[in-house]
Amino acid sequence: MEDVDLGKDRTQLIDFVYANQNGSATSLNNSNAIKNDSNLPLSEKVVKQPLQPQNQAPKPKKTPSKPSKRVSCATGSAIALFLLALAAIILAAFLGHHFTKQNYEMERLHGANQSMVACNYTRPHKRPHTPIVNEEDADENDAVKQPTKEELALPKGVQPVWYDVSLAPKAGGNGTTGLALVKLNIEEPTNKIVLNAKGIEFTKNLEKIQLSREVTKRAKKSTEDVLNNTTSGSASEGSGSLPEEEVVATTTTEAPASTFVDTGIKVTGIEFDEALEKVTLTLNEELKKGSEVVLKIPFVSKVANNNGLKEYKYRTPSGEEKSMFTTQPSYAYMRHVFPSFDQNTFAAPAGLTLMHEKGSVVVANTQVETKDDGDAKTSTLKKVLDPDFVIGDLVVNEVNTTSGVTIRVWTRPEVKQSAGRLLTYADQAIDALEHILQSRLESKVLDIVAVPNFQPGNRVSPAFIVLPEEDVLYNENSNDIVQKTKLARTISNKIAAQWFGGITNPEEFGTFWLNDALPKFLEVQALQKIVEVDTGDLWTYELEKVLEKDATATSQPLRVKNVFSAADIAEIDHEFIGKKGAAVLRMVEKSVGKDTFNKAIRSFVSSYRTAYPYDDGLWKSFEKALGGSLKGWNNEPLDVAKFVNTWVDQIGFPLVSIDKLDAENVELSQERFKNDHKTKEQFKFRNAKYWFNWEVPLFLKSSGNVGNVSWLHEAFRLPLNISDSIFLNTDSNGVYRVNYEEKRWNDIAQYLEKSHSKLSERTRARLISDVFALANSGALPFETALNVTSYLPSETGTVPWLIATRIFKKLTNRLEGAPVQDKLNNFIYEKIHKKFDELSAEDTNSNYLKSRLYKHLLSLMAIVKPEKSNEKLNELFVESFLAPCQFSGNFSSDCSEVPGELRDKVYCNGIEFGNDTVFETVQMLAEKEIDSTEKDRLQNSLACFRDPRALRRLILDNLNSTVSLTQLLRKMNSRPVGRQIATNWIIDNWSTVLKKRFSNDPETLNAIVDAGIVLENEREKSTLETFMEHHHKSTNAIENSLDQKIESATSDIYWRKQRVGELNHYLDGKFKGPAKDDEEGSSEETE
């Protein structure tokens, strides 16, 4: 059935079946149903027209003619001719079938047996464009042209000196009225002024755009007046530093005052280039070299759900809708807020004047002065590079660290009591990081603002941090150890980033991978001191996602060069770069030693962190700290820069193989590891700088005498007897996988059954991870991988179980609906039930990794033994949630008695098997909930409902919040019904909803695609490929994300074709498990 294209009928079938099951069809079938339900899928929008008969001349009238002589054929001859023709047809069909099959089998055999040769299994990298003619997609027929670096650059003849901008943000997406004064230094004569602008409207009355000269006078001003004007705003509102006026004596001082005189030069034209994000002002006279002018230009900028100034809406406990306004911490944000020279080489300080509601407060990364104007307030922000601010109804909690830093946490008044732990963890994070780095924060004040549904970015603002409220608030009654750890990690990462700056210029992006990696590395180091998590265990667990992504063709190197536009930046996965970069730094730490590593990092912070290129300073610190004491692979002093460059300048990671040469020797070699070889890398990454060769620290452990072996660069021979054991990458210190010979893998399986405790937990976890990755890629029989898990029922460690349960979950996802699924479920149940029962009776809420493991086991039990899991979850939902909350009128965070670590599962399960009344009850509780974490749980649980029309309505309701929308789509894709809805909704509503709303926001589109699209079979994969062909222009900026989805689907489809039979044989008992001591060798199965 998976290859049959049911089109719209499939969706209607789901609607019919599930709507009738929960009795919601009648209540949801009304005139207010989703308008987009009527949108046809792509497959139905192209209707084939029947062929029209050609115009034919009228047939002439028949005229009588003489009867002709008929030629007859004997019956036997006719039959013989018929049989001969039939035989010819059958023979032709047979020959065609024979040669086609032979060719197919040869290609299949070739593809199954090759290990490192890419084959063109998927679509070509560049697809032929298929034109579309419907009105919404008419622009898709335009050619896609990426601007060059030179086109994006501003003319250097005009340089900004300062900005003075007035803004009046308006709620409801009504835009921001503004007036910008920009002082310009003219370095080359010109009659044009070119600035950056994106999504900004300018006046059609060109007389309102003026050019003036600044005339400075000296005016006497009392400092007492300054204090009177600034006390109310500076003392109560946020700034990145303490008010300077508080330390000035009350004496009379001279203060400059400026007036502006018209130059007489007029603006005769204004031209906006949307693609280059520029606005050009044409003047009637040439500006002379060396002159200075002040440009005055009124404008209206959008308050949109993308870059620039963003509005975040929320509801108070009384149901009143309110808004917060924030600048977005992303590259090139100023051009979205006001016309500016928004490129690094034109950096100039900007002062802002903000008009806002009377009850609101302004918190900023600079000094703030606020005046009460009666019905409203006016706040003035002191000039600073890259001004950032938040406007909203905010209250403050504060604490002083032992080093004298004042931490101020700003929140909504109704959640102020949930900010206590954030304040405590921020204090502890600063103390921990100052101890690790042996360096103080530069600012003595740190403002932290919690904003509901805030979409974080990667630009760091000094002494100013804005975070999603749901990530950093903690309710002692409803939250669990997972939320506590998330809070500690989030604040530690952002505080660590204060030491290392942020991404400010895309031209230097290649050297700024460390801005993601260093805070991520230090985040985990600080976490150990805050919530007592074993960092080695945490690294081992979290490395899995990095290795899975980096083993794909659509991965990317850490050092990304030639990045110039917003679309280029949107393609960069900062989370992946941060995690892999941190893992590489940890590998460096394990290679050089902790003391040397810390010494180098401290030297970098104190001497080189402001140097350029940014990473060169770090490698100089390592060279100084090592002093030539450590030898590299060539037996010369280790060059840390060259060592690290092999890991950051090319995609992927190595597979280190140990192959037996003879009874006394083995060979160590390396090659790039990939999940499969069905998709080619992007052309720009295909020919890697080091030809997929790395400098690999081995972390070797052996029972034999192998000598002093530490590095692998080129293949080499190692003395090792057959009877000797050998393990590489012990304790999971390296960012690579290891493959042993199949017999040695079977020996390892035996060793784990008898003596697994002799290996560390992390080493055991790495063995389980590697053997399944190799089996999934086809490098090993699946029997070998499953044999390694034979010892699991006796495993007591947390990390090996975390890896194993993650692998089992992926297996169940891949085999959902397959005939072998029940056998696999029984196999997994036999492995996990003992550990599940053990953790069910234990309090896991005090240990982060154990809590994660319990959730993994709970998810697995819901799949392999749903009756056992669902009964318990439903009981908790009814008795511990609905009973105390449904009619109480209280917030769910106060009335729910479900343990915090189980709420996600319990709420989802209750919604999935509940009716309309249950859905409406949870929806009502979610709308009024004030605790952000609990609100997210309730909203996400709605995605588990089984009525497709309700799910579509949920998507539409959450379009204004990127965070909520992506969470909702990801949750939908974890459930059977939602999985069919999410992907289809994105494709069906691309032109009418998504493209129009997010056309200028590729980062948001990437997030939606990543969360919302899941492909399960060849038909769905083909649908997405066709969609990309038809929408080649609007999907160009997110092509890499879509390619990742297609590659993942290709891998899963190919895996099912190759592995299901092998798994079925194993689960039927046709394979006997690991070889015993008296057995020679092990069975090998070739595909």
Image (cartoon, grey):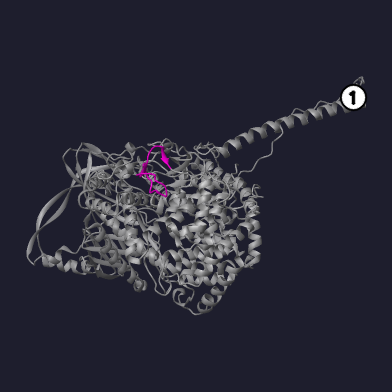
Kindly tell me whether residue 853 is visible in this rendering: yes
Front position in the image: 251 or 815 = 815
Residue 717, position in %: x, y?
42, 38
Front position in the image: 11 or 446 = 446
Quadrant housing the C terminus: top right
Front position in the image: 71 or 224 = 71
- Say how many tags the image has: 1
**SS of the residue at dot 1?**
helix
Instruction: Give the side of residue 216 with respect to residue 578, left or right.
Output: left
Residue 133, position in %: x, y?
55, 41
* Residue 700 lies in the magenta stretch: yes
Instruction: Give the side of residue 948 with respect to residue 841, left or right.
Output: right
Residue 184, position in %: x, y?
21, 45
Q: Quadrant of residue 935?
A: bottom left
Q: Which residues are magenta?
A: 695-719
Residue at left offset 53%, top offset 72%: 921
Instruction: Give the side of residue 936 with respect to residue 861, left or right.
Output: left
Q: Is residue 79 above or below residue 340?
A: above
The residue that label 1 is drawn on is 77
Residue 42, position in %: x, y?
58, 47
